[in-house]
Image (tube, helix red, strand yellow):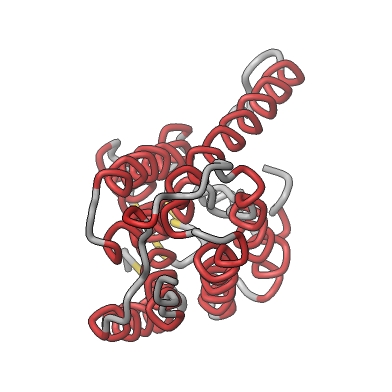
């Protein structure tokens, strides 16, 4: 009978994975792409990254980064032999791949009243 | 993303089908990857569902501080958090039928470094990112 999994450690890993996935999506995905395309990011929160100009590539980049990182994590998880590390990469991949950021625009046209219409 | 492009119905239908197929494929892949941690079916509650609920609640906690207000939390953060990774809730249905060999069973061991990292990173995330970071003045 194998030892039981340690729940506090699993919870800790889930919190880290959740935070990192969002930071990757908003910061690296939307933020860096906006900056590279000459846009000016104005605000970063756990829900969105606001920028001055509407840009399809900026909108898409968050999801594309999540897809790439999530798939890479799953591949790494399958190759890693250290149990905790393997489990973290396993846990990080769905947080990254399966958690699209809230479907709101990063453009200044965005308003709370428009949520769900874009 | 597709606003202003022609053939909106076809684009939307295509994106929906592609997204659903990709999601299902990924959850199946995920189930294969987690199999060594699930020697018995009930173990999945700990290694699959527990992190799902934890991450969802953490996302909602961060979303509660968002400067755009509670409406954003209700119509955007909560659906995205609970719906986006909901595949974790039913991924055990796609677990490979063959149980892992005893020597290939993995267990998450107690590791304080993860606890400390979660407190530090999670706390900073809630306090700074949750409330919003102004990037320009």
What's the residue at 46%, 41% (across, down)?
A63
Q: Position of residue A103 (x, y in %)?
A: 61, 49
What's the residue at 71%, 13% (across, down)?
B7
Q: Quadrant of the C terminus of chain B?
A: bottom left
Q: Position of residue B81 (x, y in %)?
A: 60, 62
- Give the side of residue B73 with respect to residue A88, left or right: right
Image vertical order of residue A38 relative to residue A49, above or below = above
Q: Quadrant of the N terminus of chain B?
A: top right
Image vertical order of residue A67 relative to residue B66, above or below = above
Image vertical order of residue B97 relative to residue B34, above or below = above
Q: Position of residue A76 (x, y in %)?
A: 27, 45
Q: Position of residue B136 (x, y in %)?
A: 31, 64
- Give the side of residue A38 with respect to residue A17, left or right: left
What's the residue at 40%, 84% (across, down)?
B127
What's the residue at 65%, 70% (across, down)?
B73
Instruction: Kindly give the residue lying farthest to the right in the view shown.
Output: B9
User: Which residue is nearer to you in this view: A39 or B76?
Assistant: B76
User: Which residue is nearer to you in this view: B84 or A54?
Assistant: B84
Q: Quadrant of residue A27?
A: bottom left
């Amino acid at each position: 009978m194998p030892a039981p999994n340690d729940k506090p450690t699993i919870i800790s890993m889930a919190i880290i994975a959740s935070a990192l996935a969002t930071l990757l999506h908003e910061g690296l995905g939307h933020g860096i792409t906006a900056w590279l395309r000459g846009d000016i990011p104005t605000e970063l929160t756990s829900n969105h990254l606001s920028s001055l100009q509407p840009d399809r590539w900026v909108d898409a980049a968050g999801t594309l980064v999540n897809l790439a990182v999530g798939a890479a994590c799953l591949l790494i998880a399958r190759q890693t032999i250290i149990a905790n590390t393997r489990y973290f990469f396993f846990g990080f991949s769905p947080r990254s791949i399966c958690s699209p950021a809230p479907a709101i625009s990063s453009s200044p046209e965005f308003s709370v009243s428009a949520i769900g219409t874009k | 993303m597709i606003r202003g492009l022609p053939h909106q119905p076809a684009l939307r239908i295509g994106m929906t089908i592609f997204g659903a197929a990709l999601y299902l494929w990924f959850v199946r892949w995920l189930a294969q990857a987690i199999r060594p941690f699930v020697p018995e079916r009930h173990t999945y509650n700990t290694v699959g569902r527990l992190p799902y609920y934890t991450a969802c609640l953490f996302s909602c906690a961060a979303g509660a501080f968002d400067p755009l207000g509670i409406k954003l939390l209700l119509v955007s953060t909560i659906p995205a958090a609970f719906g986006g990774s909901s595949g974790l809730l039913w991924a055990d249905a796609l677990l490979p039928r063959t149980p892992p060999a005893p020597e290939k069973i993995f267990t998450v061991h107690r590791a304080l470094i993860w606890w400390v990292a979660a407190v530090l990173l999670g706390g900073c995330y809630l306090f700074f990112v949750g409330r919003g970071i102004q990037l320009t003045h």
